[in-house]
Structure formats: C-alpha cells, structure tokens
Image: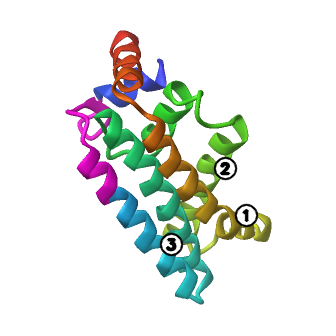
Amino acid sequence: MDKIKWCAGKKEGLSLIEPNSDLANAYIKKAEEALESMRVNIIKDWKISTAYFTIYFSLYAILMKIGIKCEIHSCTIEFAKRFLKDYFQESEFDFMEKSLKARVDSQYYIDRTVPDEQYHKMIQKAPEFLVKCKSIIIKLNEKKVNEIRDTFQKRL
C-alpha cells in the first residue's frame, strides 16, 4: 500500500487543514527553542532529541504553511519526500529519516547507540536545516501552496 494513503488513513496521520502562517511561525519558534536547548545541553541523548526536534519543528512549520496536519513523524517526512522535492535534496530526506531513527533509538532504547557520525551531523546540520526551512516558508506563495495541496488530494 502507498505510504501516503496509509498515513492519510490513520487518525493522527496526514490531513488537510487551512494553511496557517501564524502556526508556521509558532513552529519555527519551537524549532528555535529546541535549537537553543541543543546548544546548552551536555548530555548526548538530550542533544540528539533537541537536534531532532529542531529539524522536525522546522519541517512541520512548512506543513502548517501549506495546511497539512500530521502527528506521525514518519508520515510528516514521507509527505516532504513526495511533495516538497522542489525544495529539498535526496540527501536531506535521508538526513531527516536518520535523525528520526537516532532520536527514537536514543530516547526509547537502552541497548541502541547512535553512531558518532550521525550525532555530529545532527548537531552541525540542525541550525542549517532551520534556516533552510525558514527560507522555504518565505518562498511558498499562495499559488505554490495550492499546487501542493491539489497534488496531495489527487494522490489520496
């Protein structure tokens, strides 16, 4: 089954809401707060979590601007992979997925470790990702938002 259809069929999965720039800005603020937490934290597991939430809230701000709600993180990333290809490179989608896995592994499992390479990449790239998402939000005009929403609806 197509993952987008699966995500849209879940209670907390992908759904259309009204596009909302105020919510987009609120999620950017949450991303900035997570980034600040990442910077002051000294515990590796918490640095991973706050780096991930910097990335996630930055991406979710874009979804709010478009008018897409989703509470399943893997579905949020899948939406980006399918409908935001004009804004992100394949390597960035891979980074999002690996960052989600790192956050889950460090937050929920005692016997799993996050490779140092991934940890350092998250710490380094989280601020850059936030800046990139802010610029995407600025570039998303009403016409582009409607195109993405229409394409999403047609895939369902």
Task: Report which residue position mark 3 lands on.
Answer: 35
* Relative to 151, residue 81 above or below: below
Q: Percent x, y for residue 150? A: 35, 14
Residue farthest left in this picture: 18
**Mark 3 closeness class: few <14, some 14–19, many ≥20 residues within 10 Å:** many
Return the mark for residue 39. none
Mark 3 vs mark 1: in front: 3
Q: Which residues are magenta?
A: 10-26
| Picture coordinates of residue 54, whole percent (x, y) | 49, 63
83 and 44: which one is in front?
Answer: 83
**How far from the left and from the top, in percent, is residue 144?**
42, 23
Among the 4 quarters of the image, the one containing residue 119: bottom right
Q: Amino acid at mark 3?
A: Leu
Q: CA distance from mark 3 to mark 1?
A: 14 Å
Q: Disc 1 marks which residue?
A: 121
Identify the residue position indicated by label 2 in the image. Answer: 95
Chain-order first, disc 3 or disc 1: 3
Q: Quick check: 17 above or below 148?
A: below
- Mark 2 burial class by Cα count in 10 Å: few <14, some 14-19, many 20+: some
Q: Tally the numbered discs.
A: 3
**In the image: residue 91, left or right of residue 18:** right
Q: Is residue 97 left or right of residue 50?
A: right
Q: Secondary structure at mark 2?
A: helix
Residue 91: x percent and y percent? 72, 41
- Asked whether the beta carbons under mark 2 and mark 1 sit within 8 Å of each other, the answer is yes
